[in-house]
Image (cartoon, rainbow, N blue to C red):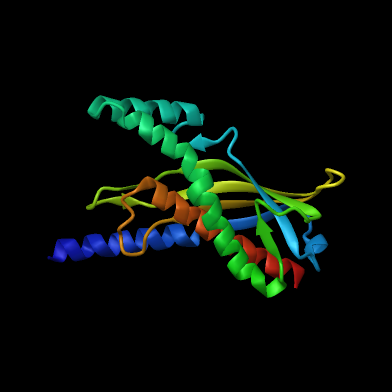
Amino acid sequence: MKKLLVFIVIQVFAAGLCLNAQKIKMQKGSLDFLKGQKSLLVTFDYSDMAVGKFDKEEDYIEKKKTEYNEKEAGKGDTWAESWVSDRETRYEPKFETLFNKYMEKAGLVGNRDVTDAQYEMNVHTIFTEPGFNVGVMRKPAYIDVVVTFKDISTGEEKASLTADNCPGQDAFGYDFDTGYRIEESYAKLGKSLAGYILKQIK
């Protein structure tokens, strides 16, 4: 029982360190141009993304697909399809939901289907750590992103920032699904990015 308690404390402490490690940093320009804006076109980019120990996402996908197919025919192919489709069906909607929830204070809405926006916010994921949860051991997912803002009509880049170590996990330990953990990373990013923007344009 004592060993179990020590293990739980270590897990909670490690999770806390991960959650506190997130950092958003302005790299270029300022966000003053967002003052008074009512809509923002949000786009997502996953090109040249590293995953876990793999510099190239395609190498990670090939390894996992092969491993799953060896265990059960077709399972790897299904997994590979979900790895990509989860972006549009899970990660991006979750980001938008949390981003807009907190941006309500400024009257600004950011979505993929906005048609009247003057500016575009591109969220480029450059690294994904899928994490894991095997019951007795777990590691949160996290993502590193570069966020770039540009004037849609002129293509001029107005500002860029980085957000590192955006963590994703279930507080109660039920994040056995990789997609769920990564989805929570985008939720955290949406919330934190909105908070950062609000501070910059107040």
In the foreground, 47 or 152: 152
Is residue 196 visible in the rendered image? The answer is: yes
**In this view of the protein, which residue sits in the foreground, 104 or 185?**
104
Q: Position of residue 139 (x, y in %)?
A: 35, 50
Nearest the viewer among 115 and 15 is: 115
User: Where 162 sits versus 53, above or below?
Assistant: below
> Seen in the image, is 141 located left or right of residue 120?
left
Image check: 177 left or right of 146? left
Q: What residue do we see at 51% from left, 29% from top? A: 56
Name the spot of residue 57 as percent of width and height, x first.
Answer: 49, 31
Q: Residue at x 24, y 29 (%)?
A: 72
Left or right: where 58 falls relative to 2 = right
The answer to whether one can see residue 52 in this image is: no
Question: Residue 101, relative to residue 42: is it above or below?
Answer: below
Residue 149 on image: x %, y %: 75, 51
| Extreme residue in the right direction | 154
Q: Is residue 166 left or right of residue 175?
A: right
Q: Residue at x 56, y 62 (%)?
A: 97
Looking at the rendering, in which quadrant would you find the C terminus? bottom right
- Answer with the quarter of the image where residue 77 lies: top left
From the image, which quarter does the N terminus lie in? bottom left
